[in-house]
Amino acid sequence: MTDDLAERLDTAARDAVAIPQIVSAAGVDPDGAYAVQEALVARRLARGERLVGIKLGLTSRAKMAQVGVGEVIWGRLTNGMAVADSTTVDTSRLIHPRIEPEVAFLLDAAGNATAVAPALEVIDSRYADFTFSLADVIADNSSAAAFAIGPWRPLPGGLDNLGVLLEVDGRVVQIGSTAAILGDPRRALVAARRLAGSRTEAGWVLLAGAATAAVPLVKGAYVRAVVEGLGTVAVRAS
Ligand code: OOG
Ligand code: MG
């Protein structure tokens, strides 16, 4: 059943066609859902992608409220999801993409942060109406679709209350603070260790989770995230 669910989620993503909440419907619990996620991402790896990091999801109340799931989750990032800063993200192969401002850490072999950067994550639920239960979203690799990372910089003294702006076509559409991310985004390092264990590798990225609710990503939009003291990162949607 795990492989069958993974295949159906993989096909939904590849065809950009939404599916019903098949994982909760099958009675799969969160642990089982992580096994589906692993099988789902294994299919991407079998096609030649490689793991480059992990993401946390639902680390802020704004995000939990937006999707109605109240637990921190994690997912796997591959090189196929990476978009260079200030370049284009192709939305024609996505179902109903959203974009959100994040903080990213660069990890060493022990899972500690060696650098930090502003980041944008594009999420795309493979479920109809962007609606899912905890098990569904876990199995769907926590809605991961694409991500862009701004310039890395050494960790500053504090990261716990930096202003965050999300702009679309030069207009501010979300305002927040890094404090929204687990009270301090550095807690994401602890949470990642707790959730993903020792799976991370030196040079991997950790996306700490969005500081604000996500907004729809519309073709043609120029989206920029600004994190006070860390700089900016941008993508254009094609
Ligand atoms: C789940 C993924 C959440 C975040 O940063 O909170 C996430 C979703 O919202 O579809 O990536
Ligand atoms: Mg995210």
Image (cartoon, rainbow, N blue to C red):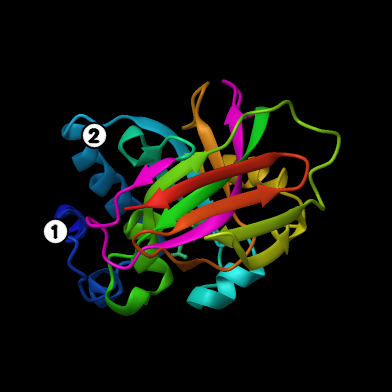
Residue sitting nearer the eye, 170 or 115: 170
Q: Which of marks 1 and 2 is in front?
A: 1
Q: Does the magenta segment cover residue 109?
A: yes
Q: Give the range drawn in magenta.
A: 87-112
User: Where does residue 185 sit, x and y in percent of width and height?
Assistant: 70, 48
Identify residue type, mark 1: Asp
SS at circle 1: helix
Residue sitting nearer the eye, 234 or 192: 234
The residue located at (22%, 76%) in the rendering is 20
Do callouts 1 and 2 mark residues in contact (Cβ within 8 Å)? no
Pointer 1 local density, CA inside 10 Å: few below 14, some 14–19, many at least 20: few
Looking at the image, which residue sits at the far right?
157
Q: How many labels does the image show?
A: 2
Q: Does the magenta segment cover residue 184?
A: no
Quadrant, the N terminus: bottom left
Q: Which callout, 1 or 2, points at the residue further toward the start of the chain?
A: 1
Could you tell me how far apart the alpha carbons at marks 1 and 2 are, in whole angstroms? Answer: 18 Å
The residue located at (79%, 51%) in the rendering is 162
Q: Is residue 65 above or below residue 38?
A: below
Work out whether residue 31 can be spotted.
no
The residue located at (57%, 43%) in the rendering is 233
Give the left or right position of residue 82, taking residue 16 as reference.
Answer: right
SS at circle 2: helix
Q: Mark 1 points at which residue?
A: 15
Q: What mark, if any, has residue 45 been given in the picture? A: 2
Give the left or right position of residue 238, taking residue 195 as reference.
Answer: left
User: Where does residue 187 sit, x and y in percent of width and height?
Assistant: 71, 47
Residue sitting nearer the eye, 184 or 35: 184
Identify residue type, mark 2: Leu
Work out whether residue 156 can be spotted.
yes
